[in-house]
Image (cartoon, rainbow, N blue to C red):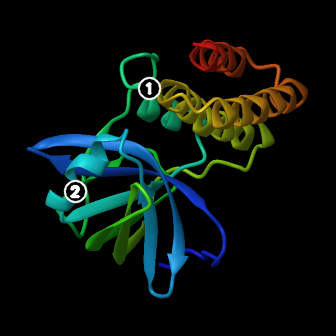
Amino acid sequence: MMIRLYTGVVYESIASTYVDGAVYHTPLGFRVSGHLLRARLYPETRLYRVVDQVRFVVLNLARNPFYYLASAFKGRVETRLEFVDARCVKAPRLVGAEAYIETLVTGVRPSNGVKVVDLEPLCVDLGEALTPYSRADAALIEMIVYATKVPVLREKGDVEGSSYYTTLFNVVRGIIGRVSDNKLYKDAVEFLGRVVSG
């Protein structure tokens, strides 16, 4: 099975692994770098703290923005995620994702306050569900990314960075208002708005 990934593009995934025997998952952007996939982990994430101990990671590729919402804001939203054992590696995979890239962690190195992680794809598998592309889904996923950044930047005292991502968040909020009038999306936008406003 092949998944076409292009260099120079950041792809969003929900990374999942086992940490001390329990499922750990978090939204994670990655890029193609030669035959590897490369991700940047920020100190605020638990994965940053444990990636040196982790051998395998599954990149769950999903278009469902509510999976990202549940992964980014564990316990604060109603959506619950279900995981099963991966096919090729000792890591969990998200039930309902469109595709899975099961990877081996081949390198972790510090770089400008983050950890750069190299992942070698060992197995690629299609999931059970195919979600059609939706502008509302894409916009909501983008809003989730910004909503995770703003509180961290605000806490660090980075007024400029916080303001920048708040502006982007509000621009994308306007896009969602134009492409979806669904209550689930409206509720998610309201929740994320509360996160961003502190």
Q: Using the rendered image of the protein, determine whether residue 35 is visible from the camera's viewpoint.
A: yes
Question: In the picture provided, is 46 more to the left or to the right than 176?
Answer: left
Between discs 2 and 1, the one toward the N terminus: 1
Q: Secondary structure at mark 2?
A: loop
Q: From the viewer's perspective, is residue 171 above or below residue 192?
A: below
Reading the image, the residue beneath label 2 is 91
* Residue type highlighted by circle 1: Phe
Residue 34, position as x, y percentages in the image: 50, 87
Q: Tag count in the figure?
A: 2
Q: Which mark is residue 73?
A: 1
The residue that appears at 48% across and 25% down in the rendered structure is 155
Q: From the viewer's perspective, is residue 125 above or below residue 16?
A: below
Residue 81, position as x, y percentages in the image: 37, 33
**In this rendering, the label closer to the viewer, 2 or 1:** 1
Label 2 environment density (alpha carbons within 10 Å; few <14, some 14–19, many ≥20): many
Residue 96, position as x, y percentages in the image: 45, 45
Mark 2 to mark 1: distance in Å?
A: 21 Å
Q: From the viewer's perspective, is residue 6 above or below residue 71?
A: below
* Residue type highlighted by circle 2: Ala
Residue 118, position as x, y percentages in the image: 36, 73
Q: Using the rendered image of the protein, determine whether residue 126 is visible from the camera's viewpoint.
A: no
